[in-house]
Amino acid sequence: QSALTQPPSASGSPGQSVTISCTGTRSDVGAFNYVSWYQQHPGKAPKLLIYELTKRPSGVPDRFSGSKSAYTASLTVSGLQAEDEADYYCSSYAGNNNLVFGGGTKLTVL
Amino acid sequence: QLQLRESGPGLVKPSETLSLTCTVSGGSLVTSNYYWAWIRQPPGKGLEYIGRTYYSGSIYYNSPLRGRVSISVDMSKNQFSLKLNSVTAADAAFYYCARLHMESHHFDYWGQGILVTVSS
């Protein structure tokens, strides 16, 4: 069982927006803004999408955005494109050098 | 461009030791602000943080594997390594090495991953 809870699946049509949630506790997501999101296409390594809750690395489209409310972080993908179909994982710092991941969400573009 | 590449046996027998190496190219492992980490992913499942090291050897292991795992650094070869002993079928996974930002705790560069199977 993963430390952070994500819905197993999400879907949307091209051009729509989809939000994926990542629920933790007062010890991880609730305590720190060190939440990151990763995109993983089949057979590939994860790729950093969002770090420090809302920041995007160079090269990541601004269609990807992050936010947080209490113990739940969220990743929003706007203007869905076929290439966004992938697995998405959240991660949070949990103090004392520990990092925890979510179980992953499979995003399907209909 | 920084690149990481995992190497090692793809097949390990039960009860034996899994040994993997991550070679860093396009940059130095000897750098402040970053740790060097291992993450694994059983096929079809989620990611699990194994642990990390600083180039000087400051090491952290995630608690579920503590006691069976060790991470070491070879600065002369720009490599860091993972050893996991007494493996079982539950340790079969894709193993990734990655660079971990020290302050904001995100993994910004990943290796391509290596699949390790546990079987006699």
Image (spheres, grey):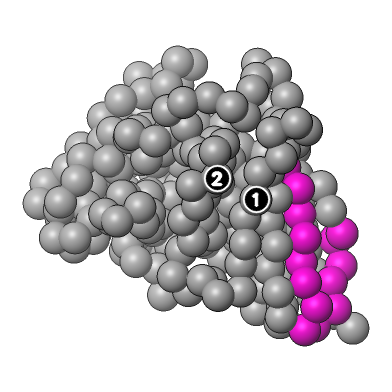
Q: For the residue carrying disc 1, how many other residues have a C-alpha within 10 Å: few (<14), some (14-19), or many (20+)?
A: many
Q: State whether residue A59 is above or below residue B44.
A: above
Of the numbered discs in the image, which one, if any, rests on residue B72? 1
Q: Secondary structure at mark 1?
A: strand
Q: Is residue B114 visible?
A: yes
Identify which amino acid the numbered label 1 is placed on.
Ser
Q: Give coordinates of residue B110: x percent, y percent.
A: 61, 37
Identify the mark nearer the N-term, 2 or 1.
2
- The quadrant holding residue A102 is bottom left
The answer to whether dots 2 and 1 both sit on one chain is yes
The one nearer the camera, A6 or B92, is B92
Q: Is residue B60 above or below residue A109?
A: below
Which x, y percent locates residue B14? 80, 83
Query: Which chain's residue wears label 2?
Result: B
How far apart marks 2 and 1 lie (CA) works out to 7 Å
Q: Residue at x 61, y 74 (%)?
A: B68
Q: Residue at x 85, y 78 (%)?
A: B13
User: Which mark is on residue A105?
Assistant: none
Q: Is residue B17 left or right of residue B107?
A: right
Q: Is residue B17 magenta?
A: yes
| Image location of residue B40, percent across then percent down | 60, 58
Q: Is residue A16 visible?
A: no
- Quarter of the view holding residue A62: top left
Q: Residue at x 71, y 80 (%)?
A: B86
Marks 2/1 in contact by CB < 8 Å: the verdict is yes
The stretch of residues the image draws in magenta is B9-22
Within 10 angstroms of label 2, few (less than 14), some, or many (20 or more) residues? few
Badge 2 is on which residue? B57
| Towards the viewer: A35 or A76 | A35
Q: Amino acid at mark 2?
A: Gly
